């Protein structure tokens, strides 16, 4: 039976990425060696790193003056690397979920943290709109896509202070105006690569403005200067990331991805809205994520939750159990998820409805 992979992360990757990675594990770039056993300083791997960096810039139209880094430590390490490098006295955070809260919590060790708004009052089911960012904040941190709650900030915000964004789960899902950001980061395991590599896009001349001592590995300038090769980078995930970047380019880039992503999300939200058994957790269409789509049983059918999960699983739907803090279901519809998989899920929802 065909499996439809709706996992939130690590998550579905293009077949192109998986096949090419598997091949390189056996024979990397004609070297007769595995990509697992070659020096990161070999000319073959240096070429991988260079091409990945360049394609990343091309695909997102990254302007001059920005650098792309591939680091270890996950997005969670960025939660403290950001304040380490950017907070002098005060930073502003928008609290839109568990990841945003974790980022905010880490920043508290570095100065005054202003939570400009929070959607915690409604279990993070919306994006706060009315808030003011203090004009003396060193930066404003947002989480563009809230993987757990299925909300998304789909526009690049205009603010008067440096904007920093966690884009772990929506990078490459839509065009981004990088010039509006000072730094963008994310774990690659949602929409780009296997876990183990973290991407950072940073405006280079914004660095070096804090007085505190920066440990070498924590200082973004180290990685800018050394082209992400100060220490051993996560070689295999970077190789896989390059394959996904090539796949993105071959498939029309982020504009084309965005079109398909919007259509896939609309198909599933339409069914959730229509089907008598289910309801969405995010009510405002403007806030609905196109990457992680959350829904629960309608109140009068709440005792069918486990039955639906079992039924869907028996039909090949994998990874649709909702996060424990939301309950119900979550279908992640990342770039690599084919439209056919969303159709299959919609069919399963209809079939289940017909039985009840
Ligand atoms: C998954 C996720 C993280 C955590 O990433 P790690 O690489 O596991 O540290 C942070 N932010 C968002 C939005 C995520 O989806």
Image (cartoon, rainbow, N blue to C red):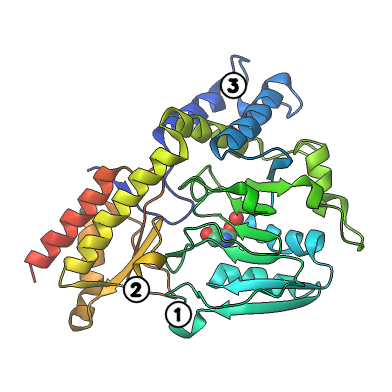
Q: Quadrant of residue 321?
A: bottom left
Q: Which mark is residue 69?
A: none
Please give left or right for residue 96 compared with residue 272 in the image: right
- Residue at 71 percent across and 39 percent down: it is 233
In the picture of the structure, the residue carrying the numbered disc 2 is 281
Along the line of sight, the residue nearer the viewer: 8 or 204: 204
Q: Quadrant of ligand 1?
A: bottom right
Disc 3 to disc 1, C-alpha distance: 47 Å
Question: Can you give x and y, in whole percent of width and height, for residue 322 in the image?
Answer: 37, 67
Check the image and name the residue furthest to the bottom: 121
Q: Is mark 2 within 8 Å of ligand 1?
A: no
Secondary structure beneath label 1: loop
Relative side of 14 to 80, left or right: left
- Name the residue beneath numbered marker 3: 28
Q: Is residue 36 visible?
A: no
Precedes in sequence: disc 1 or disc 2: 1
């Amino acid at each position: 039976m065909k499996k439809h992979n709706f996992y939130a992360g690590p998550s579905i990757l293009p077949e192109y990425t998986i096949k090419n990675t598997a091949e390189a594990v056996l024979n990397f770039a004609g070297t007769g060696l595995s990509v697992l056993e070659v020096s990161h300083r070999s000319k073959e791997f240096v070429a991988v790193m260079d091409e990945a960096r360049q394609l990343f810039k091309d695909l997102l139209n990254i302007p001059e003056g920005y650098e792309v880094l591939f680091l270890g430590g996950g997005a969670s390490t960025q939660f403290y690397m950001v304040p380490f490098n950017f907070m002098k006295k005060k930073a502003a955070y928008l609290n839109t979920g568990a990841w945003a809260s974790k980022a905010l919590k880490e920043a508290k060790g570095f100065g005054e943290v202003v939570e400009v708004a929070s959607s915690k009052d409604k279990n993070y089911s919306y994006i706060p709109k009315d808030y003011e960012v203090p004009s003396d904040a060193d930066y404003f941190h947002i989480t563009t896509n809230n993987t757990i709650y299925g909300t998304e900030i789909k526009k690049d915000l205009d603010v008067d202070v440096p904007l920093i964004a966690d884009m772990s789960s929506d990078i490459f899902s839509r065009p981004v105006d990088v010039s509006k950001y000072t730094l963008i980061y994310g774990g690659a395991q949602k929409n780009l690569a296997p876990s183990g590599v973290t991407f950072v896009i940073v405006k280079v001349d914004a660095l070096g403005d804090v007085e505190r001592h920066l440990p070498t590995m924590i200082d973004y300038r180290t990685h800018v200067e050394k082209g992400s090769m100060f220490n051993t980078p996560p070689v295999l995930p970077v190789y896989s990331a390059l394959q996904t970047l090539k796949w993105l380019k071959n498939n029309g880039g982020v504009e084309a991805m965005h079109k398909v992503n919007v259509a896939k999300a609309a198909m599933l939200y339409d069914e959730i809205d229509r089907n008598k058994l289910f309801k969405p957790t995010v009510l405002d269409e403007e806030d609905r994520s196109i990457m992680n789509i959350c829904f629960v049983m309608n109140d009068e059918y709440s005792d069918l939750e486990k039955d639906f999960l079992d039924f869907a699983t028996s039909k090949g739907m994998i990874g649709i159990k909702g996060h424990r803090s939301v309950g119900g279901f979550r279908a992640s519809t990342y770039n690599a998820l084919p439209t056919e998989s969303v159709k299959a899920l919609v069919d399963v929802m209809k079939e289940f409805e017909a039985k009840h």
